[in-house]
Amino acid sequence: MLGFFTDPYPDELLYSACARYSERTRYPNYKTNLRVLFGSQKYSAVVDLPTRLNTFISFLPEGNLYIAEKLINENTLFPFYEPFLPNARAEIVRQEMASDSDNKIHVRLGIRVKQLNAPDYLRFCPLCVDEDRYSYGETYWHRMHQLAGILVCPNHKCFLENSCLKWDRKVGYQFYLAEQFIINTFPRYLNEENPDQKILLRVAQDAQWLLSQRQLQIGPEIIRHRYFNRLLKLGFAYYKGRLRHEKFFEACDEFFSPKFFEMTGRASNGDNWLSALVQKSNTHTIYHPIRHLLLLNFLGLSAEEFFNSYIEFKAFGEPPYPCLNPSSKHYGELKIQECKILDNISKDVDKQGIPLGIFSCNCGFTYQRLGPDKTEKDKFTYSLVKEYGKTWEDKLTELWVDLTLSISKIGELLGVSELSVIRHAIRLNLPMNTSDSRIIQGYDKYRNPNKSFSEMRTQYRQEWLKILKENSQASRQELMDISNFHYLWFRRNDSDWIEEHLPEPQKVSRNSDILDWEMIDLEVSREVEKVCNEILSINEFPVRVSITEIINRTGYKTWIEKREKKLPLTTEIINRFLEEPEDYMIRKVKWAEEEFLKEGRIPTRLQFTIKAVVRNKTSTSAKVQKAIDESLARLKGN
């Protein structure tokens, strides 16, 4: 049990607090430090998402108030990722951070999929450093400053600076104190008139807010729904569920400058992630939080507004809606519980895609109007009556036979014109031009060939059933081609019925020959060869050339995993560069030899195997043992 621990400062990484503890205790061996804090010499000093937190807490002095949840929420980067994860996955990550068991945290968060480049160095804000030293007598590593894609300090509105501590495998060997790696530099203030820098500041403010939240979760389905709903309000989506891609991308290109995504660490790679992010069906793919925050900025929302005070856009307001049937006893009352929304079809470009609301009352009266509603009065208007219904028709029949009422008065009572009264009377075969009925001279000219909505629906259903019977073996697409008019009418006006009266969609087999595999093979192989050479040229501790490392660095996961079927050139290059564990160990031995030569030291065999990280893994490998013997001999000879 520890006699004391350096309690974390506000927004301090647990890694940083451990570094301050290490500085005070000054254990002679950094592995002893890892064992004392986390119970294992093999534990890595993780900057962003540490594990074994329950073990760490068990070593703290008695009476401490720490629990794993508190450390995760206040001293790790996990709250930045959590809001965009499925709830079950977020809970698994929290459990893995608390426990000592093996974990897949970076895989679960999508960090290993190269959506965004991580910072090369741990970073700091010069003004935060000054404030830390004034308040606490020392500075420390802030969580906020280490987030990938965040380039500015939201508190001081200046750019973050790189420290001298590179964020690579070396960082994981031990805890490094911020005071030892932060350099004195003047702050570079933002120009808030610059559109790109304005976005960077807003994104940083959103990220800071996310870090301050505790287990913020609404679920991917709600997130996608809110994205799409906002796009509807801004006119970038159709009510049928599709995105207005051209208009959306044009607006994105205008909002984000061509260089902006490169500034944030390759937040875009030409893969249309902006549109993928808003698709309602795409709830299982994990996208980096920066991408979500950039989309929120484009949509004109802050993270706090989106998660805590989001107001759903409803083109026609909240139900219930009024029945506008003047013949009913409930005229003007809020009786309609649902509004069917369609995309308006119009030759007028300005009216295309705007919401068209259809309201149906149980009295049979159905009306529609274009939205969105701008005032409360709009709720009591309509642009067209689709169906008058039986209640209205019965009232017309009743008024028609009352010869004391003029046609004009009947129209006034029913909310239609005189011409409409006559046309509907003709349609309903009401008595006229007899000795005891109304006289309508030349009434044939008033005859309206248009049928009511229900009459058209009945007619079209009968016609479609006849088409189905005559073409019983036809596919869905063939039926659409046979009578495209019927299909489109049903899709717009009777979509549930037509879906029940269509054959099952045929699964179209994808023709793999559509892709130019030769060109893909050439491009992927070049990238793989470049990456393999980069791995082999790393000056610090060697990294093994493995399939996993190649995939992580290129991003071509699917193609590389299936390379042997379509990518012969890529397969050849991968096979040439791939390292067996034994070969990798020999390369580490050579690296350790070079390091000892630079230091001018002659190590013992134990020191050498620890430096090369081949201890306890080479007992059965004569080649590795021989390589160690040769290296030690050369070092002694020098």
Image (cartoon, rainbow, N blue to C red):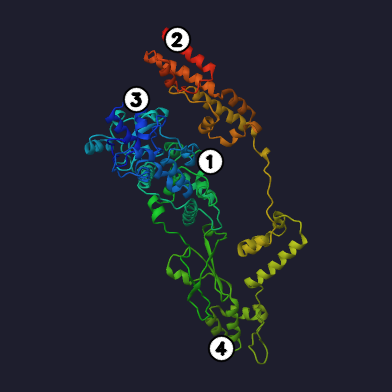
Q: x%, y% of residue 575?
A: 60, 25
577 shown above or below 286: above
Q: Nearer the viewer, residue 630 or 405?
A: 630
Q: Which residue is mark 4?
A: 405
- Give the residue at x 63% y 73%: 452
Decide which of tag 4 and tag 1 comes sooner along the chain. Answer: 1
Say if mark 3 contacts mark 4, CB within 8 Å. no
Q: Amino acid at mark 1?
A: Asp
Give the class, few, some or many, for how many residues have Cα within 10 Å of label 3's Cα (few <14, many ≥20).
few
Instruction: Specify the quadrant that holds the C terminus.
Output: top left
Give the SS element for disc 4. Answer: loop
Q: Amino acid at mark 4?
A: Leu
Q: Which residue is mark 3?
A: 29
Give the SS element for disc 2. Answer: helix
Of badges 3 and 2, nearer the viewer stands 3
Give the class, few, some or many, for how many residues have Cα within 10 Å of label 2's Cα (few <14, many ≥20).
few
Q: From mark 1 to mark 3, how far is it between C-alphas?
A: 47 Å
- Give the residue at x 49% y 50%: 220
Q: Label for residue 125? A: none
Say if mark 1 contacts mark 3, CB within 8 Å. no
Q: Is residue 302 visible?
A: no
Q: Label for residue 634? A: 2
Q: Which residue is mark 1?
A: 271
Q: x%, y% of residue 83?
A: 43, 48
Q: Nearer the viewer, residue 128 or 94?
A: 94
Q: Amino acid at mark 2?
A: Arg
Give the class, few, some or many, for how many residues have Cα within 10 Å of label 1's Cα (few <14, many ≥20).
few
116 shown above or below 396: above
